[in-house]
Image (spheres, grey):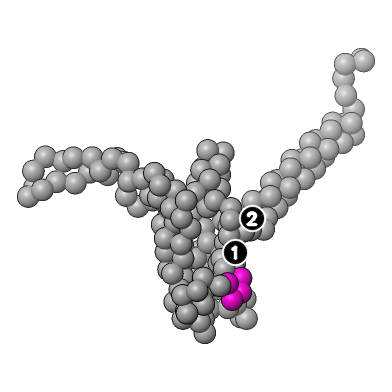
Amino acid sequence: EGMARSPLKTKLILLLLTSSQLIRSIVSERSRHRQPRRLAPHESIYRFLKIENEAGNMRPKVTLAALKVDDEGDDRAEYEYDIDVVQANQAVTRQTTYSIDAGSPHPIGDLGVKFLVQDRSSFGYHEGIVHSVEAKSTTFALISVDEKTENVHGIVKKQGDKAMNVEQLT
């Protein structure tokens, strides 16, 4: 008699369990769509990617704060320039093979480079679908991060601006 639960108590327990699962999924969804971290020009892009990848995030998003240097060559910064990027999926991996003249296959091995590309979602795009009529034109960004030297090189272009080289040297 003491072990049997009333139908009302059972429904309440199920309702509480369902509610807690719903709350957890909402919190999890919000944490996945949090604002990307903003890296200052002096912060290492390589180290940021390394930490994120080691934590299991293979597509980290980040806003790079770059200093626009004038064209006169005197290395004076004109203004900050934010670049929203995401780590690209690797199309070529260490398991990819190649052959010469249809010979035996050889593995590519470790390429030692990661790529960052423009983050389309920061401009109202998600998986190729425009969510906002007023979304800005996509910024072009292709940035390589050398895992051996930790140097970063790339090119970025925003609507209305000239293409710019991006560098972070260690």
Residue 155: x and y, percent?
43, 68
Q: Residues within 10 Å of mark 1 (few under 14, many from 20)?
A: some
Residue 63: x and y, percent?
59, 61
Q: Secondary structure at mark 2?
A: strand
Question: Could you tell me if the residues under marks 2 and 1 are in contact, i.e. CB atoms within 8 Å?
Answer: no
Q: Is residue 136 magenta?
A: no
Name the chief secondary structure element in magenta.
Answer: strand
Whole-angstrom CA distance, mark 2 to mark 1, is 10 Å
Instruction: Indicate left or right for 150 with 68 as reference.
Output: left
Q: Secondary structure at mark 1?
A: strand
Circle 1: residue type: Ala
The residue at which mark 1 appears reads as 65
Magenta residue span: 77-81
Q: Earlier in the sequence, mark 2 or mark 1?
A: 2
Instruction: Indicate left or right for 8 with 151 as reference.
Output: right
Residue name at image x 52 percent, y 38 percent: 54
Check residue 79 in the rendering and tell me which mark sits there, or answer none.
none
Check residue 37 in the rendering and tell me which mark sits there, or answer none.
2
Residue name at image x 46 percent, y 70 percent: 156
User: Residue 65 occupies which quadrant of the picture?
Assistant: bottom right
Quick check: can you spot residue 22?
Answer: no
User: Residue 37 occupies which quadrant of the picture?
Assistant: bottom right
